[in-house]
Image (cartoon, rainbow, N blue to C red):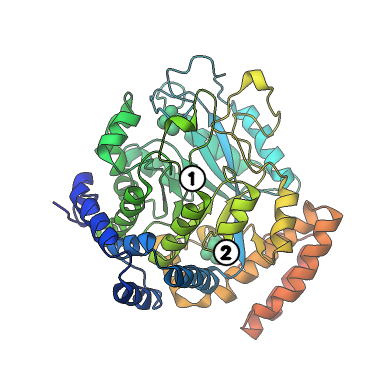
Amino acid sequence: MYNVMSSKAEEFISHEEILESLAYAEANKNNRELIDEILAKARQRKGLSHREAAVLLDCQLEDKNQEIYELAQQIKKDFYGNRIVMFAPLYLSNYCINGCEYCPYHVKNKHIARKKLTQEEIVKEVIALQDMGHKRLALEAGEDPVNNPIEYILECIHTIYGIKHKNGAIRRVNVNIAATTVENYQKLKEAGIGTYILFQETYHKESYEKLHPTGPKHDYAYHTEAMDRAMEGGIDDVGLGVLFGLNNYRYDFTGILMHAEHLESYKGVGPHTISVPRLRRADDIDPDVFDNGISDDIFAKIVACIRIAVPYTGMIVSTRESQSCREKVLHLGISQISGASRTSVGGYVEPEPEEENSAQFDVSDNRTLDEVVRWLMEMDYVPSFCTACYREGRTGDRFMTLLKSGQIVNCCHPNALMTLKEYLEDYASKETKAIGDALIEKELEVITNPKVKEKVIDYLANIHHGERDFRF
Ligand code: SF4
Ligand code: SF4
């Protein structure tokens, strides 16, 4: 039975409730009156229920779909302005004991090169990332209690935070590792992680169990309840995601919103981020065997509807998506993107030869960070390397309070401009720097509080003269 407040996966992600929601959405996909009501509610910027959002996702009325896209764009502008937060994944180890059918790291893949970074190798990878200009990382590792125990992950985090190279620093380490115990989440919290990210892959239990035939990940309930345990362990910021293409997208779209509702109701804080990866080709994986692939248009609709349904949740798109696809969804709701990603273990120092493929998936967007930053600025986005909230202790509900206060413009925007300025001074090409400096000049006008603006102008001058790490 559906119960948003239950601690049991099968009750807060109720299969029956999803099926009923999908039937309701299907029955109402041309119901102009209802869609108008839902849009009116969405315009209050307080979000939508999973059922209401499912109706918008299914909506077949062209003029209403146009309204959906326009509203998503407006909400994106209101909450996130034109800022896009930059990050990079760092693959620590591809040893894994799980049997996930869609991932080349699955235990039965015997020809993939297995690698695990030593602490010395991590230093080299992180210096390479710092030399690009990255400040925010997402750590990735397979599940393997022998090769990648929690102690290894903690040691890696400690190493990463300790690396100081020229003006480089990793200021926020997010972690994407397998579902674990409350005690281990406490340890991750103590190690100073930012967001704990765990993709559900699919909320459809039966498909989930088939796609994960072996290994600890097979346990649907343990996996689905992981975010509750993470929050119990003190981690305020959690990141959800499904892998679109594994299962019916309408089902997983509804499931992920139900998960967000559960965290908000049961734990008092909704998810910090939602990621929207799509299945990609990889070693030993042929996406054609999964027949749930979604078109770019449906992908864009999903992004827009999530933006409307959970306005306070950041949305992430990775280099799995091509430049053109990323361009299309940026304005509909994406607030974070990865740049210049390497999805192989050790790939930042040494891009690996074909025959030694240890990558988790093929990257579609292969540009350098400098190119990605310039591309964003040419479209009038402000690439941001900001990590201020986490470092000021504004996590969980305190972060949400900032978002809801409308003071973002006097906080995020200055932070974005200052961290962009650091990037331009330390890492950008001449051409990118010229574009960026002009953009910062223009964007200073967006700051409404005159005192803040004055301070920012001072700080920017200090950054130009070599000082670093100012923040609001
Ligand atoms: Fe292992 Fe994660 Fe890949 Fe599954 S998706 S095989 S758990 S690395
Ligand atoms: Fe994100 Fe906080 Fe920085 Fe704003 S100030 S961009 S919410 S980290």
Quadrant showing the C terminus:
bottom right
Task: State left or right for residue 4 relative to residue 243.
Answer: left
Q: Residue at x 35, y 44 (%)?
A: 248
Q: Residue at x 85, y 57 (%)?
A: 431
Q: Residue furthest right?
A: 430
Q: Residue at x 33, y 74 (%)?
A: 32
Could you tell me if residue 387 is visible in this image? no
> Circle 2: is it few (<14), some (14-19), or many (20+) Cα within 10 Å?
many
Task: State left or right for residue 68 relative to residue 456.
Answer: left
At label 1, which amino acid type do we have? Pro
Q: Which residue is mark 2?
A: 331
Could you tell me if residue 127 is visible in this image? yes
Residue 99 in the image: above or below residue 371: above
Q: Residue furthest bottom?
A: 450
x%, y% of residue 83? 61, 65
x%, y% of residue 165? 73, 43
Identify the mark nearer the N-term, 1 or 2: 1
Task: State left or right for residue 211 relative to residue 324.
Answer: left
Q: Which residue is mark 1?
A: 277
Q: Quadrant of residue 223?
A: top left
Q: Residue at x 74, y 44 (%)?
A: 131
Label 1 residue SS: loop
